[in-house]
């Protein structure tokens, strides 16, 4: 399953998630539910900045930050990272945090499984390569 | 005259209710950090570390 399909499933399952973005290990947006790409980029950048700020927080110490939730009056922002990928989501106010985290992790795991199951593309043989061999 | 009394009553009763509810909502603003060892830290609004996270989240919303 590709990132866009996994996010589409997430939005369908979780009524509390308003928008979500999946990012690769370098922080590039793999997929976003936002209609406007700039909005997706902004949510993704904010999520990465939150994870980075969490890493640098004295409260973190020697531990490794895996997920965070920042709750505001206007809504909440969630960020989860697992096996190189990250997912950032914006929700309505006072969401059920446990459920949102579960749905976000399920989305990331679905993507990871899809990447493992996808067969490696066989290299295309060319006459030039054959002649050289 | 009854209108003025009613307005004064509204201000006297409604003002504190509005103020308290706003403060209660502000207290709900916080950040939860979860770690690989299963532990969790909550940063309440007012703490310097929390303010940075709250500002970043506000930008995202």
Image: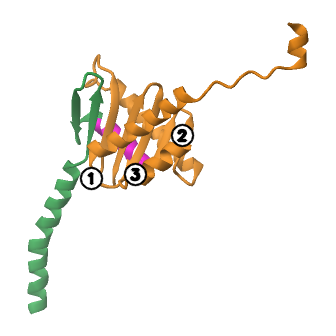
Chain colours: A orange, B green
Q: Which x, y percent locates residue A13?
A: 40, 51
Q: Residues within 10 Å of mark 3 (few under 14, many from 20)?
A: few
Residue found at x 57% / y 48%: A38
User: Which quadrant of the figure contains the N terminus of chain B?
Assistant: bottom left
User: Residue extending furthest bottom?
Assistant: B1
Mark 3 lies on a secondary structure that is: helix
Position of B7 with respect to B52 (left or right) is left
Q: Left or right? Give the position of B8 relative to A117.
A: left
State the extent of the magenta-drawn residues as a range: B50-61
Q: Is A15 or B60 nearer to us in this picture?
A: A15
Mark closest to the chain's N terminus, 3 or 1: 3
Check residue B56 for magenta coloring: yes
Q: Is-magenta flag for residue A3? A: no
Tell me what residue is drawn at x 34 percent, y 55 percent. Answer: A92
- Element at label 1: loop
- Does dot 2 land on a helix, a strand or a loop? helix
Q: Of all residues shown, which one is farthest toward the top?
A: A133
Could you tell which of marks 3 and 2 lies nearer the N-terminus?
A: 2
Q: Which residue is mark 1?
A: A94
Disc 1 or 2, which lies upstream in sequence?
2
Is the magenta region chiefly helix, strand or loop? helix
Tell me, yes or no, whether dots 1 and 2 are on the same chain. Answer: yes
Tell me if mark 1 has few (under 14), some (14-19) or many (20+) residues whose alpha carbon lies within 10 angstroms of its own.
some
Q: Is residue B1 visible?
A: no
- Identify which residue is drawn at 41% across, 30% down: A81
Q: Residue beneath label 3, please? A: A13
Mark identifier at residue A54: none
Give the Cα separation between the discs numbered 3 and 1. 18 Å
**C-alpha span from label 1 to label 2:** 27 Å
Residue position marked by numbered label 2 in the rendering:
A3
- Residue A29 visible at all: yes
């Amino acid at each position: 399953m590709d990132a866009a399909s996994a996010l589409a499933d997430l939005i369908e399952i979780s009524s509390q998630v308003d928008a979500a973005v999946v990012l690769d290990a370098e922080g590039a947006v793999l997929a976003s539910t936002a209609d406007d790409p700039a909005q997706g980029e902004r949510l993704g950048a904010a999520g990465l900045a939150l994870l980075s700020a969490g890493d640098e927080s004295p409260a973190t110490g020697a531990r490794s930050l895996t997920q965070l939730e920042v709750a505001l009056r206007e809504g909440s922002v969630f960020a989860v990272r697992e096996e190189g990928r990250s997912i950032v989501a914006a929700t309505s106010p006072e969401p059920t945090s446990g459920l949102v985290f579960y749905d976000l992790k399920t989305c990331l795991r679905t993507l990871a499984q899809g990447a493992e199951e996808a067969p490696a593309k066989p290299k295309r043989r060319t006459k030039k390569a054959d002649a050289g061999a | 005259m009854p209108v003025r009394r009613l307005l004064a009553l509204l201000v006297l009763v409604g003002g504190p209710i509005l103020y308290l509810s706003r403060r209660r909502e502000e207290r709900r603003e916080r950040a939860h950090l979860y770690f690989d060892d299963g532990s969790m830290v909550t940063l309440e609004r007012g703490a310097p570390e929390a303010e940075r996270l709250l500002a970043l989240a506000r930008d995202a919303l």
